[in-house]
Amino acid sequence: MRRVAITHVAQSSGAESRESLMDFTYQINREILDKAGLKREDVGCIIAGSADIFHSGLSCANAFDWDGIGAFLKEGSRAEESAMSFIYGCMRILSGHYDTVLVTALVKGSENPDNDPITSFYGDPFYLRPVGINESVVAAMQMRQYMERYKVTEEQCAKVAVKNLANALFNPYADRKRRVSLKDVMSSERVYDPLKALECAPKSDGVVSVLLASESRAKKLTKKPVWFAGYGCSMDHFNPGDRDLLNGQLKTAAAAAYKMAGVRDPKKKIDVAEVCEPYAFQELLWCEQLGFCGEGGGGKLIDSGATQMDGALPVNPSGGVLATNPYPARGLYRIAEAALQIKGEAGEHQVGKKVKTALAHSTHGFGGQCHSVVILSA
Amino acid sequence: MAKEYRTIRNDVALPYQWALGKTWPRFFDGLKEEKIRGTKCADCGRVYVPARTFCPVCFTDMTQWVDVKPEGKIVTWTLVREKYYGQVKEPPYVVALIKLDGADCGFSHFIGGFDLSDAKQVRQKLKTGAKVKAVWSPEKKADIHDIVCFAPVK
Amino acid sequence: MGKAVAIIGTGQTKHGRRSDVCYPDLVKEAVSAALMDAGITLKDIDGVVLGTMPSMMEGVSSTHFYFAEAMGAVGKPVMKVETCGSTGQSIGHCGFFWVASGMADIVLVVGSEKMSEGDGQATMTTVFDPFFQRTFAAGAPGVFTMQSMEWMYRFKIPEEKGREAAAMISVSNHDNAMDNPYAHIRTRVTMDDVKNARVITYPVRLLDVCPASDGACAVVFASERTAKKICKKPAWIKGLGFRGEEFFYGESDKAIWMSATEAAKEAYQQAGIRNPMKQLDVAELYNPFTYQEMIFYECFGFCPRGEAPDYVLKGAFKKGGQLPCCPSGGTLCTNPIGATGLIRLAEAALQVTGKAGARQVEGAKLALSHAMGGVDQFNAVTILGSKL
Amino acid sequence: MSKEEYRIVKGQVMVPYELALGRTWSEFYDYLKEEKIMGKKCGKCSRVLVPPRSFCPRCFEDMDEWVEVSQEGVVETWVYVNMPFFAQEIKIPFISAQIRLDGSDTGFIHQVAGIDLSDFDSVRETVKLGGRVKAVWSKEKKGNILDIAYFEPVK
């Protein structure tokens, strides 16, 4: 099999931008091409990651995206979620048809309504939407089950927000920058009881690009290629009532990714993880399902300090989605951050240990209906 | 202007007419008669509510109709206090997954019929596994709101 | 070119106004048909690709969630790929690359639309930017009329001649649809019917325009090894290309239409096609408007620029002509947008495998399929062949 | 069962967005207020783009040079719109046109008006492909594209 590497990464801040969406996109893709010393013409193919409903009311998102990503008269496509865009980019190179692919995900949350009304449109118009189902509602129901079934405490869930927002202070690209205490989180508004306001991700802007290259090309483009080692994705049932919300498809997605990457013991092998946690407790649940601890062990995991920036298995040193949530782009942000950790270029939020293998995770849909896991290696 | 830089409003408002297909009208007609109808899979034996045309697990057609009880147990719930654009109703309200007696999956609906203004009291009252039963709307339109909500059974 | 990939099965719904089914059930109808055609079950599928028009079309967003079961994707990896009207071809391309990458052996590709549930023209209007152009947008017909007028003016095509040729295209597409059991519009029309039909946007009349359809299509892609093992007559993917132009209408020349020209050029190069008119046996173009079909003939090198009407009037693209186009009745008679480009691909696969029934072009071995999207912004082409 | 008997549910979806214009487009609208149509010129390919961009989509380079283009131009193509659409902004019938303003290298989309639009045949006599049109300004400027009220045929 051919190999694919991430050679370069560029990302915008998650804070509100006053640029038009088109210019906002252009600036990041201009930056990544400059970093790589490439011209637009040199890139084999460009894949966008954007979702119509999160796209400022401009439908057929790729139409508006096309100029800013630099795809005029180029081969290209678009996937609706950015981890999917990344995988599609890898496929294009693995197929042998392309040596370089630019993958760009973009959104301006500041131009969109809140995420809750938007995600309510995931629901069918007959059963789920009319009874107020949206992503936060299902997450809150999932959290209650999680705490009851495994005796994980509200404080343990809240600690995730404390940790990730602290990490975000060292990430120049983070949106929500504010040191919060456990008390702050616990006393923040119970927006979807038991979910509290500081346990829910904000709505951010964000453009992020990664340049992918085949092995021979990557070695010419950079001294530190980050290799794509494994991938898994799995879709769950649509109706939350048809599933066990605590036993979804992340295990399946992770197993596929670990198998492809040859990871037998994720606890030992994974040096750092960027996990998609739009709701604080989800980081704990996802960590269990990624095999970082046993079933129901998420509470103890956060208590142990292992997932702190200087811990044995740092999770979300970037501050994660709780700090920065450019919804359809957040998956590619996780991948980009994981790549930066391997390159040793994460700056102030570079983790203490040496990173050889990193995991990036993305999820979207009610209660994590769809999960993607990507393994990167040095 | 609310923002300190120049913007334009871009409201997307569109009309729809969604087809219910062959299975769902029968389910909604059931609600009109204060019955909750599910379909049973001949292969795996699971009963699904709302009814479906095919089994989501086995991918085979379901033709057998089964009435389930208009009461069941709370699987999980949340008290919604957040306000947002286009919300289905004014907070506070409770959304829950309810396992109806005779069904093999969770059913999403509201829980109500008591004072929701105090979150602490709501938490004391609503426990996972607690029994609830359907409160029917006096006026029926053959849609999901024919059930107003589920109320705790004393 | 890398690993070979084949299409081993296709399935379509009966297209039209399908108020008899809810949206997920419509999708399942196509998926079940494709599985049966390929002789496989859901267990054999390694991944699923879905594409539709934007969420505004039917008012449910991110439908890969809603269709999880209908497309048999539970427990499987999913890709949601969308490029406006060219979605149907783009998801086919994704299916191709997924298998060609070696990360999957069999991939199911699903495209769907249920246009009767939304307002198609209003949805299309939201593709235009709200800064400069939406104010003047008149849905798809407005744009395609502007393009057709520009093209006729550029190449000095007399209005009468253009009208005559466009009418002939409408008549032959409608005739062809009579042979296609899945087609939405199945009525014969005469030249006079077309020429006297109600004006939509002059000179485009009602019978120059596609319908708004409900429908779904599913196509199964497989690796060379598997295709040879389980399929008697696979359709091999010989070449593919996708190109897009600038977003703002008017920035690039739509009478020459670089995206269409370059997408075909790319696909031809991969497929080793130098003389498309001679080498291709059949073409399934994405032709929502009769006049526009002629521009495609020119972009795809079927005839010199400005001469498409002459070729049409000679009958070059009719059934039995030099290069039969849209034997299925085309987009002009069936247009569930998210599925339409994939239907073109499925129809091309049926043609090169001799499975197209009454619409079969005798002995077809090499076929072109195509889709167009955005405000005349995107074009995608896939070439299929009967031989590896 | 006849088709009418199939049940449908009617509904509306309304999603509000608010978009940033960014610097380039804000300035373009400011110029419109002064009754100037400004484009941006690419330093590399020398094309002048109207509406302006902060970057050239083909060369993918920043565009810094503002250039005023003529308020007159040539009709490259047009369409007579006489069918109603949901949420249409302009009352039908209207003419949507692609106009190549003198001094620019792109087609500019706007409307042609200022003539009797009720009779299509007489419209065809007045509005011609390749014909010249010029901008007519709105008295009241709102900072949107209709600050140019319309383009009218040059006699």
Image (tube, coloured by chain):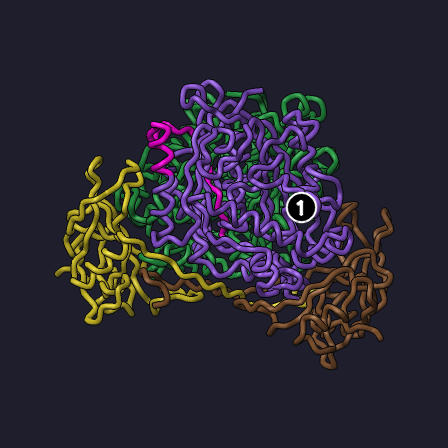
Above/below status of A319 relative to A292? below
Chain corresponding to yellow in the figure: D
Chain corresponding to green in the figure: C
Chain corresponding to brown in the figure: B
As drawn, is B55 to the left or to the right of C265? right
* Farthest-out residue, bottom: B138
Q: Position of residue C365 (x, y in %)?
A: 56, 25
Residue at horizontal 50 percent and vertical 53 percent from the top: A179
Chain corresponding to purple in the figure: A
Find numbered disc 1 in the image and state the secondary structure of the residue it sits on.
helix
Task: Specify whether residue C85 is in view.
Answer: no
* Chain containing mark 1: A
Task: Specify whether residue A153 is in view.
Answer: yes
Read off the residue under disc 1: A303
Residue range in magenta is A29-52
Q: Is residue A30 magenta?
A: yes
Find residue C102 and report its image quarter: top right
Q: Position of residue A282 (x, y in %)?
A: 64, 49
Q: Position of residue A245 (x, y in %)?
A: 72, 51
